[in-house]
């Protein structure tokens, strides 16, 4: 059956869509969605904004629905007339803005049906007489982060044109059919073969995945800690560098932090990339983005400047081969089918303009979620030469509590400032301060409980023979010994040892007879001992050959 408003033409899913579709089937309760909103204060014409969004959706061919054909998923393009943008009014709430934020946070954690329902969901939320939140949520199968921003930017262009009664500049239309064809062309091209050979050579030498949590868990909707840009006039982001160089600085700083916190020298991070290496891909909506491994060997055992160089070289190499799918790289590493391969913490560099202009009103994009997280995602937004970038942490709640995540967030922000201050200096990564201000004085030197008077084992046992002398100290195979029994036996053993000329600090080998029913309950024989390994036999033989004095620890 063809849904209302759909073209009826079946289009195969791209490799990126296939991977997301399969992952969603395996974890139906985990929504693979992205969500963001724009905070707009000023004279916004809400009806025109809704119309502009609908026009941009139809123009870009962003709205698709899935169809099942003999058990295989296909997609159909659908016009937005099937579902208009709705306006929700929260102005009657006690705190409209916070109520709207909580509404959006809940909405983007609800699993999406993937049959005939829309995979893109947009609302305009009124939170004041002159303030609205323009909210958008999309399944990763329909839009990736790049496409979500493209949709918002094109909507803004249609809105501004509507205010003036005109139309925006033409946009090159690359719909689902062209995107699917471009994917098939790439996978049968020499470029694909070159990319495959590169990753096949690199895969066996990738460092092990490390985590700040020290363990792993299945992907979950993330808990989020949002940071604000921090003015640090004495340690600005290095000016005069290219975008690549500034990116390398941020990559190197986080990799160095990961290496220090996990006490390793070789680390690897997951690097999201647009994978839009052609003009037509950059004009398209849809889901194209990829995640590639960024291997940073030796970054924990080098200097700050050398770490930046390692990160820069790794970025250049990875970006040259960014279209080769992470699922294919995962197969080289033995990842199970259907799993979205993780190469460690995600370092998500949000290199887009965060402001959206709607005529006289400009609003900032606030990302609510980038999708489920297997471990940790570090989202870094652009900064200026005198302003640190904004850094958000998203993490798997099965691995990180909000308190632990906030602690890592504060610690990395401080570490980044320290890292930036050492650029150009001959400072080793291992010498960078990990402690927060004032933390070292609290934690070092280590402080324990008040000192207690030293006591020997003999003194402790003697103390136990007082009022507690009849209490059971040892149970062994049906027999029990009180503290007083232990005191008597140990005194007898001490006399035996002294009589043999053995004194303090002398070594005594203790041998237990292998064949005895002495300690067996009810006079039954012991069960046969399990067979000894060759190494155990060698140890036993060595012990037998070196024993000169034998004694039973607890004589009858």
Image (spheres, helix red, strand yellow):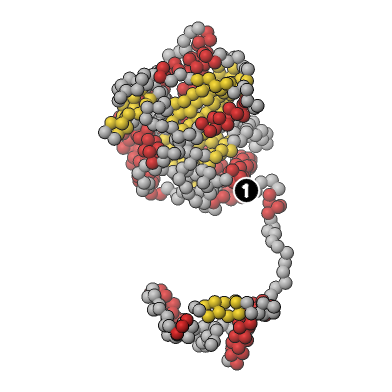
Q: Residue at x 41, y 41 (%)?
A: 27
Residue in front for this viewpoint, 503 or 322? 503
Q: What residue is disc 1 on?
A: 434
Q: Is residue 246 visible?
A: no
Q: Is residue 497 visible?
A: yes
- Residue located at (50% from left, 7% from top): 165
Image spot of residue 552 (x, y percent) = 52, 85
User: x, y percentage for residue 474?
Assistant: 57, 77
61 over 319 or under it: above or below: above
Q: Residue at x 26, y 33 (%)?
A: 70
Nearer the observer, 474 or 173? 474
The picture quadrant where one finds residue 461 is bottom right
Q: Is residue 353 left or right of residue 82?
A: right
Picture coordinates of residue 38 (x, y %)? 56, 24
Element at badge 1? loop
- In the picture as drawn, the residue positioned furthest to the bottom comes out as 499
* Vertical position of residue 44 compared to residue 183: above or below: above
**As drawn, is 234 to the left or to the right of 253?**
right
Q: Residue at point 61% right, 80% down?
A: 482
Residue at the front extreme of this rendering: 522
Quarter holding the N terminus is: top left
């Amino acid at each position: 059956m063809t849904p209302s408003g759909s073209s009826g033409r079946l289009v195969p899913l791209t490799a990126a869509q296939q991977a997301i579709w399969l992952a969603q089937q395996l974890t139906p309760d985990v929504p693979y969605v992205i969500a963001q909103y724009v905070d707009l204060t000023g004279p916004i014409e809400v009806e025109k904004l809704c119309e502009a969004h609908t026009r941009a959706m139809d123009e870009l061919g962003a709205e698709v629905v899935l169809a099942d054909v003999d058990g295989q998923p296909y997609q159909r393009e659908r016009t937005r007339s099937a579902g208009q943008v709705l306006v929700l009014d929260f102005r009657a709430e006690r705190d409209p803005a916070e109520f709207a934020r909580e509404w959006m946070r809940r909405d983007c954690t609800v699993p999406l049906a993937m049959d005939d329902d829309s995979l893109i969901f947009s609302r305009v939320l009124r939170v004041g007489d002159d303030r609205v939140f323009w909210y958008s949520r999309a399944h990763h199968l329909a839009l990736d982060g790049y496409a979500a921003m493209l949709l918002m930017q094109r909507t803004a262009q249609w809105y501004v044109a509507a205010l003036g009664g005109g139309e925006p500049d033409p946009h090159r239309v690359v719909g689902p059919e062209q995107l699917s064809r471009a994917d098939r062309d790439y996978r049968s091209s020499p470029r694909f073969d070159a990319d495959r050979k590169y990753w096949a050579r690199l895969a066996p030498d990738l460092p092990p995945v490390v985590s700040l949590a020290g363990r792993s868990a299945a992907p979950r909707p993330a808990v989020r800690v949002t940071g604000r840009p921090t003015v640090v006039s004495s340690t600005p982001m290095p000016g005069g560098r290219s975008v690549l160089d500034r990116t390398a600085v941020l990559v190197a700083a986080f990799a160095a932090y990961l290496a220090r916190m996990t006490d390793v020298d070789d680390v690897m991070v997951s690097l999201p990339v647009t994978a839009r290496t052609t003009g037509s891909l950059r004009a398209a909506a849809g889901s194209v983005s990829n995640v590639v491994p960024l291997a940073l060997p030796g970054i924990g055992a080098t200097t700050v400047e050398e770490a930046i160089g390692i990160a820069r070289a790794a970025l250049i190499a990875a970006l040259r081969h960014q279209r080769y799918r992470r699922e294919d790289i995962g197969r080289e590493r033995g990842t199970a089918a259907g799993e979205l391969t993780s190469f460690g913490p995600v370092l998500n560099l949000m290199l887009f303009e965060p402001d959206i202009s709607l005529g006289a009103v400009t609003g900032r994009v606030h990302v609510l979620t980038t999708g489920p997280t297997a471990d940790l995602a570090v989202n870094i937004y652009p900064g200026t030469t005198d302003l640190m970038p904004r850094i958000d942490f998203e993490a798997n709640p099965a691995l990180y509590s909000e308190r632990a995540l906030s602690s890592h967030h504060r610690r990395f922000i401080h570490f980044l400032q320290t890292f930036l201050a050492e650029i150009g200096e001959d400072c080793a990564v291992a010498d960078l301060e990990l402690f927060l201000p004032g933390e070292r004085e609290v934690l070092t030197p280590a402080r324990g409980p008040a000192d207690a008077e030293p006591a020997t084992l003999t003194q402790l046992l003697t103390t136990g023979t007082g009022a507690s002398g009849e209490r059971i100290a040892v149970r062994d195979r049906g027999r029990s010994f009180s503290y007083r029994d232990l005191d008597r036996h140990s005194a007898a053993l001490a006399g035996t040892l002294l009589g043999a000329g053995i004194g303090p600090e002398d070594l005594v080998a203790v041998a237990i007879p292998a064949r005895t029913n002495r300690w067996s309950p009810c006079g039954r024989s012991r069960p046969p001992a399990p067979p000894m390994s060759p190494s155990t036999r060698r140890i036993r033989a060595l012990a037998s050959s070196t024993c000169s004095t034998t004694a039973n620890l607890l004589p009858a």
